[in-house]
Image: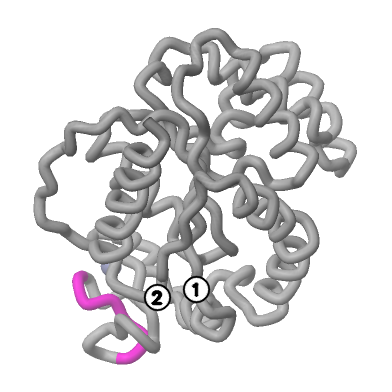
């Protein structure tokens, strides 16, 4: 989370159900998920967090995943799916939840669709919202990012520069440029995204419970669009 503040939004009287947030790296899925959590009182489920939680608790799934990661291997879809399944059996997901960073592949999406149909606890169908941002804009967001190592404030040399170049407004600390915020790293991530995750968007766009929102606006405007898309999708489905 950044230190940006936002006006208070009263929690809308809507049962959100399962919500899937889609979008390329850097579109702001994590930030939007935080706002949806706060506004609807539902948890965010990200595979990264679920994986770390299983490893920290030393579950069988966590041990299996850690063994593979220690050998430099990727955690396969079925292991990730099993962790998501265990997470979705917890009681805090009853009113809904936000999936962020999952499903990452078409295989995971197909498993999720089948699992949700068979899971007794689910009452509402999954809705998918894709946050769309132009690739050039994403590149500027990522390569322009600078972080204060002391107060963790995030700047962007294009859209949110510090008052004095290269140093933090709050404490005067020299700002840092993370090594994976380069054009090369971005291009690699986009390549993986386009081959693995773009088919997931294609898949959900054919299912009717899908909307796209323009992510190249202020965080508040994007949140408002996501929430109104969610309301429309839920009303259309009832
Ligand atoms: Zn600072």
Does the stretch in magenta take in 150? no
Percent x, y of residue 182: 63, 78
Q: Are marks 1 and 2 in contact (CB under 8 Å)?
A: yes
Residue closest to the eye, 235 or 10: 235
Q: Majority secondary structure of the magenta segment? A: loop
Percent x, y of residue 210: 51, 50
Q: In the displayed structure, does residue 81 sit left or right of residue 50? A: right
- Above-or-below relation of 65 to 227: above
Percent x, y of residue 67: 84, 27
Q: In the displayed structure, does residue 57 sit left or right of residue 209? A: right
The residue tagged with tag 2: helix, strand or loop?
loop
Residue 156, quarter of picture: bottom left
Q: In the displayed structure, does residue 92 sit left or right of residue 134? A: left
Does the stretch in magenta take in 166? yes
Q: What segment carries the magenta color?
A: 165-170
Q: Gap in Å between the C-alphas at discs 1 and 2?
A: 6 Å
> Mark 1 Cα within 10 Å, few/some/many (few <14, many 20+)?
some
Which residue lies at the image location 55% right of the left edge and 70% below the top edge? 178
The residue indicated by pointer 2 is 216
Image mark for residue 73: none
Is ligand 1 closer than 8 angstroms to the Cβ of mark 2?
no
Residue closest to the eye, 65 or 22: 22
- Above-or-below relation of 121 to 207: above
Image mark for residue 133: 1
Residue closest to the eye, 26 or 165: 26
């Amino acid at each position: 989370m950044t230190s940006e503040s936002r006006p208070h939004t009263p929690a809308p009287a809507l049962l959100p159900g399962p919500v899937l947030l889609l979008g390329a790296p850097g579109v702001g899925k994590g930030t939007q998920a935080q706002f949806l959590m706060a506004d609807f009182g539902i948890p965010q489920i990200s595979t990264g967090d679920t994986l770390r939680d299983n490893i920290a608790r030393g579950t069988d799934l966590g041990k299996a995943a850690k063994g593979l990661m220690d050998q430099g291997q990727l955690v396969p879809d079925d292991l990730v799916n099993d962790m998501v399944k265990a997470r979705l059996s917890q009681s805090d997901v009853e009113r809904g939840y936000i999936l962020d960073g999952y499903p990452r592949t078409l295989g995971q999406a197909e498993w999720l669709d089948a699992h949700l149909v068979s899971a007794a606890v689910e009452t509402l169908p999954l809705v998918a919202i894709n946050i769309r941002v132009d690739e050039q804009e994403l590149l500027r967001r990522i390569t322009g990012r600078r972080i204060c190592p002391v107060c963790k404030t995030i700047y962007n040399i294009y859209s949110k520069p510090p008052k004095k170049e290269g140093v933090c407004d709050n404490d005067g600390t020299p700002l840092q440029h993370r090594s994976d915020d380069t054009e090369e790293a971005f291009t690699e991530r986009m390549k993986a995204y386009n081959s693995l995750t773009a088919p997931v968007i294609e898949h959900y766009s054919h299912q009717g419970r899908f909307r796209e929102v323009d992510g190249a606006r202020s965080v508040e405007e994007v949140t408002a669009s996501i929430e109104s898309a969610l309301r429309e999708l839920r009303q259309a489905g009832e």
